[in-house]
Image (spheres, helix red, strand yellow):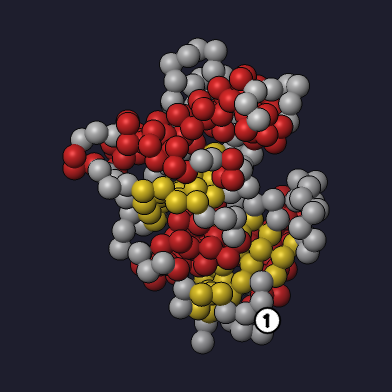
Amino acid sequence: MARTAGVLVVQHIAAGLVDKDQIAGPLRMFPEKSDSHDALLAMPADAIAAKIAEVVSASAGSQPLAAQQVKGFRLQQALESLLSTGAGHVAVRIYNDADATAAGIAATRGVLHKLNRVWTLGNGVGFGRYPWAEGTWEGGHSVVTLDPKEQFCGCGGRGHLEGFLGYRAMRMRFLDLEPEEVFANAKAGEQRCAEFVSRCHRALAAATATSIHMDGPGPFYLTGPNAKWIDVGKLDRLVHEMVKMSPLQGSRIEMIPPNDELGIIGAAVNARHATAVA
Ligand SMILES: [Zn+2]
């Protein structure tokens, strides 16, 4: 029987076979050691494509693949041709990592019927949703302030959420401190850092409130390497200050520890749905 492989490509490659919304078999990783985070940055795109194909083939073993889902790069055609040797055509679908994570959370919690939204906090700020829908969905670039001095977002736009919470943006804002030190100093009561951390929470609450005003209430999940810096209770209070209309009440915010499996499962869930419809 043909199976679906899910692949997550972020700072590393992780792949696994997915069956009935669960990982079915060992996860394959590249690099195998989680501390070699720069390995992909140094690789040309065609070498990354070949490495993804290798990791996927290893996860599939001798079983044929029906669909596979990759996120992070525009690699669909390269991967289809690399994977479709011998065993026939393998369909590849590519989604952003936050969309894959949203699908993985929805599938593993049995809430595929609800609108699930995800913020991923890392080098940038990702926004994902399940059900997957055609669209731009650049929620990380939501405008959260009219202050023209706020121009740290990687895209160059002013006043964006990522200009506060993106790791790269924080390094540009605090040239004398690493982001880890900023959050540690804030906890210790240092005023400049505490004010910034407070504004980070207001910025994320504002973008969340905008999403609720545009798309309705529902669960929001926070994940990614830097989600640990967010106080979920504080964020929840701020969102409730910003969303007052009674039909829009009932959203909740939950922290999800970084987890490759959710992205892999979600990638496969989205790909299977897409290839079943096609
Ligand atoms: Zn931006």
Q: Residue furthest bottom?
A: 1
Q: Is residue 266 depicted above or below 136 in this figure?
A: below
User: Which residue is found at the position 43% from the left and 16% from the top?
Assistant: 146
Residue 51 appears anywhere in the view: yes
Q: Residue furthest top?
A: 148
- Asked if ligand 1 lies within 8 A of label 1, the reply is no
Q: Residue furthest front?
A: 188
Q: Is residue 73 depicted above or below 108 in this figure?
A: above
Residue 272's spot in the image, x, y percent? 45, 69
Residue 187's spot in the image, x, y percent? 62, 33
Based on the displayed image, in which of its 4 quarters is residue 185 positioned?
top right
User: Which amino acid type is marked by label 1?
Assistant: Gly
Residue 189's spot in the image, x, y percent? 62, 26
Residue 126 appears anywhere in the view: no
Residue 42's spot in the image, x, y percent? 80, 46
Residue behind mark 1:
61
Q: Is residue 255 left or right of residue 243?
A: right
Q: Say which quadrant the C terminus sits in.
A: bottom left
Q: Is residue 267 depicted above or below 175 in this figure?
A: below
Based on the displayed image, in which of its 4 quarters is residue 63 positioned?
bottom right
| Mark 1 closeness class: few <14, some 14–19, many ≥20 residues within 10 Å | few
Q: Nearer the viewer, residue 276 or 21?
A: 21
Q: Is residue 165 depicted above or below 19 in this figure?
A: above
Q: Is residue 149 left or right of residue 111?
A: right
Callout 1: SS: loop
User: Which residue is found at the position 30% from the left and 63% from the top?
Assistant: 113
User: Which residue is found at the position 56% from the left and 45% from the top?
Assistant: 227
User: Which residue is found at the position 50% from the left and 12% from the top?
Assistant: 148
